[in-house]
Image (cartoon, helix red, strand yellow):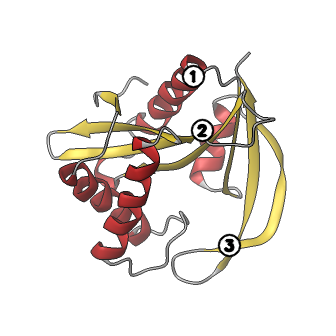
Amino acid sequence: MPTPHPIRELPHLDEAAIRSLADVLIDCVESGASVGFMHPLSRPRAESFWRQIAAGVAGGQRAILVAEDEQGICGTVQLALDLPENQPHRADLCKMLVHRRARRQGLAASLLAHAERLALSRNRTLLVLDAVTDGDAARLYARQGWCRVGDVPGFALMPDGAPCSTTYFYKSLA
């Protein structure tokens, strides 16, 4: 299903983008997504996270894609590009976030496809990611042709403190 949300790469993150990305992150944590943060996630903590990501984007260690609607950024995904020198062909796909107002419209699949094309444009032919085992994101990745590697029980905590396992996936783009 094509998404009505335009997607673009941000070459840098200004304060407006940081605030908007913080809104998306806070919304995802509030809705129960295990994305590295506990609930409640404060605005200063969320903005601090995005300022760290901004430094990585500015330094070329990360690439970030955003999707926008009339209210601003409603989805995002990153490629971590700063990997060991024996892995110049690989990137980690991380922090796929979609605001609740934009879910169930094909946006995550569209962000994923854009990230795969962006990876290829950066000569990255192998992508790796992890997702909550049997969660919505894991099902999306499987539907989009990502290969399941395995599960790690008790890997992280959900935002409410409940333990969850994670599933690792990879996709060869070559």
Q: Is residue 138 left or right of residue 152?
A: left
Q: Residues within 10 Å of mark 2 (few under 14, many from 20)?
A: many
Which circle, 1 or 3, is nearer the viewer? 1
Residue at figure coordinates x 33%, y 35% from the top left: 10
Q: Residues within 10 Å of mark 1 (few under 14, many from 20)?
A: some
In the picture, the quarter occupied by the N terminus is top left
Q: Is residue 34 above or below residue 119?
A: below
Q: Which mark is residue 81?
A: 2
The residue indicated by pointer 3 is 156
Q: Is residue 85 left or right of residue 101?
A: right
Percent position (x, y) of residue 117?
53, 20
Furthest residue in direction right, as rendered: 150
* Secondary element at image label 3: strand
Front one among 106 and 24: 24
Q: Type of residue at label 1?
A: Arg
Q: Quadrant of residue 170?
A: top right
Percent position (x, y) of residue 61?
53, 42
Q: Quadrant of residue 11?
A: top left
Residue at figure coordinates x 82%, y 63% from the top left: 152
Callout 2 touching callout 1 (CB < 8 Å): yes
Q: Is residue 81 above or below residue 48?
A: above
Q: Earlier in the sequence, mark 1 or mark 3?
A: 1
Q: Is residue 67 left or right of residue 171?
A: left
Q: Is residue 71 above or below residue 34?
A: above
Q: Type of residue at label 2?
A: Leu
Front one among 30 and 63: 63
* Secondary element at image label 2: loop
Q: Type of residue at label 3?
A: Ala
Give the distance between the C-alpha atoms of the residues marked 3 and 2, in whole angstroms: 23 Å
Q: Which mark is residue 122?
A: 1
Residue at figure coordinates x 41%, y 51% from the top left: 55
